[in-house]
Image: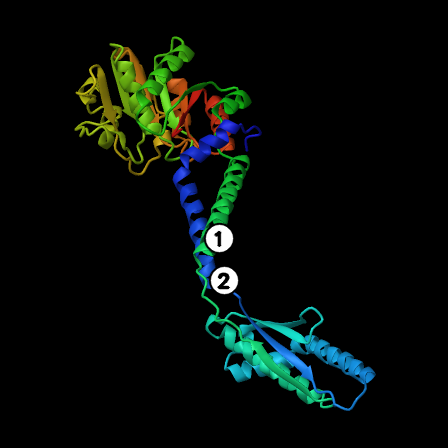
């Protein structure tokens, strides 16, 4: 795992994966906006006001009148705890014909110390909010009258509850959607930072160069727009690092690292300098360069090594690039290509190629999977490894460099593809 991660590296990760992050953020926003439709339940209130009176005999003195006033006040006060009881809620739901779970609560309060009670019923049933409130008030009045028979109480509704108006979910959906959008941005940002910090693949080419003491020859972009410029940078850096060597080996650390295309492009830009160049597909397991270059060779590397024909007879001139010749092999049967590259016949082939062409570029399959590159490196010397941005493990590159150096190859540098 790389020990150093720059802010620009994190931003580069976001730019490469912006479509995925956009879809994640959009999903959070949509999910947040739809949640109110599923889980949000508006609570509506109905308010009913009723008045309580207490009969007073005509023949009592004035002091007794005062006692009756206090009695009335205490009776009205008792309505407040009765209103919040579970019994009233249950009986209200039963009489109003609703589910008790639809009634959130019922509360009551005394208005300005007067014998007036303001009852409020909260419910999720908008169509029956007024009915529930009036029903609760009627039941509470009946309970008061029955509970306090002496002196006689009378109660009547002075203000019936008004019909509740349904509320739209648009406001709630908009707010929830915005919150979901913000959450999506936060989640995406945290995921991106963690993905880069915990990544064990090659992302920072400069860090790899310093950590392994291996030269970074070029960074090949993901798009084709600047690829030509990057390949020419590779040509200049590789020729400088190789010195007098005119024979190169291009191999991928892992499969699908883009080494085959780097090899063909590198050979092409070498030919553009007016030199003669031979590109050899050394993948004798599953050769791909011929089909990629749309060439159908009749004679192969295998035939040259077996002495069936000469190198110049087998090499095919690439019409699109003046000075570039191509030689491909076919999958070998019953033998390991790594053994074939260690034979004297192959050594003679390499010497003949160096004598015939100004530059020779070999391509070998994945070094981590096959030992072919190690067998070739002792003949070729100038070795270029390709790693794929965000895909090739750092430790795999380190191990490949060590093995190729031990096999006699001169590791002149590496190329990062898919930047």
Q: Which quadrant of the structure image shows residue 343? A: top left
Which disc, if any, is residue 15? none
| Residue neighbourhood size for the residue with mark 1, other residues' Cα within 10 Å, grouped as few (<14), some (14–19), many (≥20) | many
Would residue 352 be visible to someone looking at this image? no
Kindly report the distance in space between the C-alpha atoms of the residues bearing marks 1 and 2: 10 Å
23 sits left or right of 300 in the view? right
Is the C terminus in the top left, top right, bottom left or bottom right quadrant?
top left
Q: Are marks 1 and 2 in contact (CB under 8 Å)?
A: yes
225 sits left or right of 391 in the view? left
Name above or below for residue 295 compared with residue 161: above
At a point 47% along the width and 53% down the height, the residue shown is 32
318 sits left or right of 384 in the view? left
Name above or below for residue 238 compared with residue 328: above
Name above or below for residue 78 compared with residue 317: below
> How far across and down, in percent of the image, does residue 108 sit?
65, 72
Which disc, if any, is residue 176? 1
Would residue 296 be visible to someone looking at this image? yes
> How far across and down, in percent of the image, does residue 109 sit?
67, 71
Camera-side residue of 164 and 112: 112
- Residue at the far top in the pictured view: 244
Helix, strand or loop at label 2? It is loop
Is the N terminus in the top left, top right, bottom left or bottom right quadrant?
top right
At a point 60% along the width and 82% down the height, the residue shown is 156
303 sits left or right of 212 in the view? left
> How far across and down, in percent of the image, does residue 282 sit?
31, 27
Which disc, if any, is residue 40? 2
């Amino acid at each position: 795992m790389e020990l150093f991660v720059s802010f620009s590296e994190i931003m580069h990760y976001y730019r490469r994966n912006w479509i995925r992050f956009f879809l994640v953020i959009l999903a959070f926003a949509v999910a947040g906006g739809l949640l109110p439709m599923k889980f949000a339940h508006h609570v509506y209130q109905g308010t009913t006001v009723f008045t309580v009176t207490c009969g007073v005999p005509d023949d009592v003195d004035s002091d007794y009148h005062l006692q009756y006033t206090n009695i009335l006040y205490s009776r009205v006060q008792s309505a407040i705890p009765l209103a919040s009881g579970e019994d009233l809620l249950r009986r209200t739901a039963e009489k109003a014909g609703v589910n008790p779970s639809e009634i959130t609560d019922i509360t009551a309060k005394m208005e300005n110390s007067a014998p007036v009670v303001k009852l409020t019923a909260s419910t999720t049933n908008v169509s029956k909010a007024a009915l529930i409130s009036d029903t609760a008030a009627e039941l509470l009045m009946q309970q008061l009258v029955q509970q306090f028979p002496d002196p006689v109480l009378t109660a009547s509704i002075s203000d019936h509850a008004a019909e509740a108006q349904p509320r739209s979910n648009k406001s709630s959906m908009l707010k929830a959607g915005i919150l979901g959008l913000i959450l999506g941005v936060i989640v995406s940002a945290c995921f991106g930072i963690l993905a880069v910090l915990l990544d064990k693949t090659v992302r920072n080419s400069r860090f790899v160069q310093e950590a392994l003491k291996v030269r970074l020859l070029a960074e090949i972009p993901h798009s084709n727009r600047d690829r030509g410029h990057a390949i020419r940078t590779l040509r200049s850096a590789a020729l400088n690092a190789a010195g007098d060597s005119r024979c190169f080996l291009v191999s991928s650390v892992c499969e699908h690292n883009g080494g085959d295309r780097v090899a063909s492009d590198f050979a092409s830009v070498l030919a553009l300098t007016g030199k003669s160049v031979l590109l050899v597909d050394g993948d004798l397991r599953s050769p791909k360069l011929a089909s990629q270059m749309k060439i159908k060779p009749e004679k192969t590397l295998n035939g040259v090594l077996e002495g069936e024909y000469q190198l110049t007879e087998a090499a095919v001139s690439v019409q699109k690039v003046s000075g570039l010749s191509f030689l491909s092999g076919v999958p070998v049967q019953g033998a390991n290509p790594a053994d074939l590259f260690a034979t004297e016949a192959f050594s003679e082939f390499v010497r003949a190629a160096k004598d015939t062409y100004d530059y020779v570029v070999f391509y070998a399959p994945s070094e981590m999977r096959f030992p072919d590159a190690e067998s070739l490196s002792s003949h070729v010397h100038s070795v270029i490894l390709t790693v794929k941005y965000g895909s090739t493990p750092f430790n795999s590159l380190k191990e490949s460099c060590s093995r190729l150096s031990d096999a006699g190859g001169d590791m002149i540098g590496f190329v990062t593809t898919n930047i």
